[in-house]
Image (cartoon, rainbow, N blue to C red):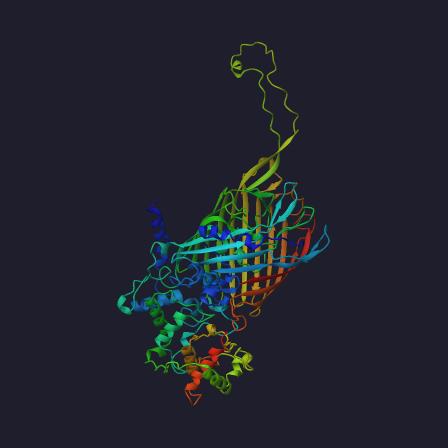
């Protein structure tokens, strides 16, 4: 695997200023919070970056301890930097891949795929900010010669303002407590609605959001790194990205509206890693039900990219179970993307415009018994000539996800079904309109520092069954991933590491269960990856 | 449209606001206790559980294999007190912990209003019937003397003679010979404090806080009370001076 070049982080730092003016939150591990509130990572995370119940409540309360209205602002600039900024680097630093045919086994060291700077925290009692600057989005695209190439970009990933609407409008006030109960001033009500572990919100997130953080199976909280697609030096796609199939685009040969390739395994729509949009979510019915609706725009990676379309979504999540025993959640999703995808295809050249030999008005007067000139030229021979045509497609995604936890066991699963509309008739028989994806994961907390995991992905992809971009071949794939993560330190061993920080090593083996053919689904057989997470 | 947005907001939040005040048995509580329970459920129950047993929804992942775990209030054992070892804490003790938090483990809840903090204290006390009895008298915490170099030197001798090094190590790094075998009363492994980092002291880092810790001990942990350990009460202040000198 070739070493990848990446933009230095300093190249994107000026965007901090833009971020401050634009947007707020997601749920990544953020040591800045640990520093600010003097906590270990384990206070909010069951296994970084996955949040526990306290971490979710912390997040939903605008990055403040649940129930609290405000938090002291950092006193000095150095405090603000130390307590408001965090760095996270993660990715694979070694990969060894085997292929059934084509290239010989490839292996090599690489720089980490992702390195991010975070800036986050509460701004006011009702508003909080979250900004993530990522130095690379390992993008696989097609260049003008039709070759697949990998390129790295830097810039804004997630960035949004999160506003607690009831707090903003002064509707919290759950407790109009008597002043005489204690000889203390009553200031305001609690920072959550109602009483007890009850409802919350609605919260509004505006900016570049990742809506799926609230889904039962949240994309960016997985403990398996996403591995980008692998391309050969000659422009062939050797392997699609090792990403959760349930959340991928699932169609071969489609493009984003920004004319970027959208590979079948790339997360998109509701499960986008980040896209301009607005999200509303909150909890009802004693916090058992989490509702969410909103819309994202074009999934193109560039910040402030052309906004072509809107993809509204609605999601409901139901939390259940005994917190001390078996518990979990179920989520259902509906997501519609209007003109979300684009396809390019070859269409027959249209008939040329018939040149009129006579002024049109003269034809209205059939006075000539014999036409002295031919009315038109003969048409071109049938099938001769073609042009590249394009068509925008609508897409509907429905999905269900669930997780189940008991003791050290943690199971996740998600299934999505996608269907596209407005496929040109010309593509009948060549373009499959429906696709499905399934992802399931099981983690076991072996010890405080060892976490073995297994994940299974299945996709029955749609889209072009054969075209000039992707070679014909199977459009169905199954992948099994095995992984062991070793938390060298997690920041909670404060006697050993007196700073909130995280260092994790991971050893992973991804096995292609359906190898065969030149198709990027089947051409690779196995990948062994060594990765790490470092957060400070 | 200007009317629609607030109306929609009210409709969305109404079911939540209509929820009962407590997760269980709220109807039988007085209004004051119902409010106290509501504050507790908002801020504390995530870790300590709605019944105060230290089994809240986030408790599982907080130091599963290491002490401290979220406190089980129903057992009536409290580490951070100003009262003699084995006694219950005062209201001020509970409030101090709530406001300061516990470095590394529990956030400060200064973000609650003053009245809400007192209500949370009241809610915590409901979980153990012993709080209905009169409080014990807090230990006497005298004004700190001058903690000079001589006090540090005397404190070093006290540190060695008092057996502190067996847990905290000769240089206070928390690596004494018995450090790896220490367990709390629930059987979980517990680390002795690394005295180089006073900001991580659970019971506070000021000289008076350290003195209080030495006098009261940390109930439920291997840290005993040294209230009667030395003939000269001033030895404890010497020890405080020495511990302060270890800070980085």
Residue A424 coordinates in the image, percent (x, y): 57, 36
Q: Quadrant of the N terminus of chain A?
A: bottom right
Tell me which residue sits at (34%, 47%) in the image: B4
Whether residue A94 can be seen here: yes
Taking depth in this image into account, of A201 and B146 the one nearest to the observer is: B146
Taking depth in this image into account, of A317 and A12 the one nearest to the observer is: A12
Q: Is residue A97 left or right of residue A267?
A: right
Residue A455 higher or lower than A344, as above or below: below
Residue A269 coordinates in the image, percent (x, y): 52, 48
Residue B14 coordinates in the image, percent (x, y): 35, 55
Residue A199 higher or lower than A336, as above or below: below
Residue A342 coordinates in the image, percent (x, y): 56, 41
Residue A372 higher or lower than A219, as above or below: above
Taking depth in this image into account, of B236 and B212 the one nearest to the observer is: B236
Whether residue B77 can be seen here: no
Residue A234 higher or lower than A424, as above or below: below
Q: Is residue A165 left or right of residue B167?
A: left
Residue furthest to the front in view is B149
Tell me which residue sits at (36%, 79%) in the image: B130
Q: How many marks?
A: 0
Residue furthest to the bottom in view is B231
């Amino acid at each position: 695997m070739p070493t990848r070049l990446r933009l230095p982080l300093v190249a994107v730092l000026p965007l901090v200023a833009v971020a401050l003016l634009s947007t707020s939150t997601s749920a990544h591990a953020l040591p800045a919070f640990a520093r600010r509130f003097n906590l270990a990572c384990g206070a909010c995370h069951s296994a970084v970056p996955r949040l526990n119940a306290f971490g979710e409540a912390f997040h939903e309360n605008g990055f403040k301890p649940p129930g609290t209205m405000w938090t002291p602002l950092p006193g000095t600039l150095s405090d603000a930097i130390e307590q408001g900024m965090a760095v996270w680097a993660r990715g694979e630093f070694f990969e060894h891949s085997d292929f059934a045919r084509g290239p010989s086994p490839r292996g090599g060291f690489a720089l980490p795929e992702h390195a991010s700077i975070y800036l986050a925290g509460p701004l006011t009692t009702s508003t909080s900010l979250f900004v993530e600057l990522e130095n690379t989005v390992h993008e696989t695209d097609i260049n003008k010669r039709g070759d697949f190439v990998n390129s790295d970009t830097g810039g804004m990933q997630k960035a949004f303002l999160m506003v607690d609407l009831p707090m903003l409008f002064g509707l919290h006030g759950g407790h109009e407590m008597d002043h005489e109960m204690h000889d203390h001033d009553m200031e305001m009500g609690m920072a959550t609605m109602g009483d007890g572990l009850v409802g919350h919100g609605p919260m509004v997130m505006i900016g570049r959001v990742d809506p799926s953080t609230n889904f039962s199976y949240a994309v960016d909280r997985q403990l398996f790194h996403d591995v980008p697609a692998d391309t050969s030096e000659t422009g062939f796609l050797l392997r699609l990205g090792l990403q959760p199939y349930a959340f991928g685009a699932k169609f071969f040969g489609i493009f984003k509206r920004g004319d970027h390739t959208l590979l079948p395994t790339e997360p998109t729509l509701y499960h986008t890693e980040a896209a301009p949009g607005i999200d509303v979510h909150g909890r009802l019915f004693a916090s058992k039900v989490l509702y969410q609706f909103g819309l994202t725009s074009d999934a193109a990676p560039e910040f402030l990219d052309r906004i072509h379309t809107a993809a509204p979504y609605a999601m409901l999540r139901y939390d259940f179970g005994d917190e001390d025993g078996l518990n979990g959640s179920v989520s259902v999703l509906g997501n519609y993307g209007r003109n979300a995808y684009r396809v390019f295809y070859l269409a027959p050249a249209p008939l040329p415009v018939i040149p009129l030999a006579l002024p049109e008005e003269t034809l209205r007067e059939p006075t000539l018994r014999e036409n002295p000139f031919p009315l038109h030229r003969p048409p071109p021979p049938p099938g001769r000539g073609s042009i590249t045509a394009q068509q925008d497609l609508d897409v509907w995604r429905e999905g269900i996800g669930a997780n189940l936890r008991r003791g050290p066991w943690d199971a996740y699963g998600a299934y999505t079904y996608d269907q596209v509309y407005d496929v040109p008739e010309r593509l009948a028989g060549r373009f499959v309109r429906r696709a499905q994806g399934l992802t399931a994961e099981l983690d076991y907390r072996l010890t405080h520092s060892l976490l073995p995991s297994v994940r299974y992905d299945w996709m029955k992809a749609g889209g072009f069954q054969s075209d000039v971009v992707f070679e014909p071949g199977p459009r169905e794939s199954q992948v099994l991933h095995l992984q062991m993560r070793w938390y060298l330190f997690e920041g909670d061993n404060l006697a050993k590491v007196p700073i909130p920080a995280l260092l994790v090593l991971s050893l992973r083996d991804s096995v292609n269960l359906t190898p065969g053919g030149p198709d990027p689904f089947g051409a690779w057989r196995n990948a062994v990856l060594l990765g790490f997470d470092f957060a400070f | 449209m200007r009317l629609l947005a607030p109306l929609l907001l009210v409709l969305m939040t109404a079911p939540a606001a209509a929820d009962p005040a407590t997760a269980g048995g709220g109807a039988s509580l007085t209004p004051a206790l119902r409010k106290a329970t509501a504050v507790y459920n908002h801020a504390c129950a995530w870790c300590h559980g709605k019944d105060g047993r230290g089994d809240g929804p986030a408790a599982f992942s907080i130091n599963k294999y290491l002490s401290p775990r979220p406190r089980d209030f129903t057992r009536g054992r409290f580490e951070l007190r100003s009262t003699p070892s084995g006694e219950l804490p005062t209201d001020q003790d509970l409030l101090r912990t709530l406001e300061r938090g516990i470095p590394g483990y529990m956030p400060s809840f200064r973000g609650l209003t003053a009245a809400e903090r007192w209500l949370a204290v009241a809610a915590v006390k409901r979980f153990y019937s012993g709080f209905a009895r009169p409080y014990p008298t807090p230990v006497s915490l005298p004004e700190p003397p001058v903690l000079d170099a001589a006090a540090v030197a005397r404190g070093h001798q006290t540190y060695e003679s008092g057996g502190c090094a067996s847990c905290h190590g000769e240089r206070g790094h928390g690596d004494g010979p018995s450090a790896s075998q220490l367990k709390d009363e629930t059987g979980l492994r517990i680390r002795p404090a690394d005295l180089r980092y006073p900001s991580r002291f659970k019971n506070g880092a000021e000289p008076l806080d350290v003195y209080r810790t030495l006098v009261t001990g940390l109930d439920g942990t291997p840290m005993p009370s040294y209230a009667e350990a030395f003939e000269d009460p001033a030895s404890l202040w010497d020890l405080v001076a020495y511990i302060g000198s270890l800070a980085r």
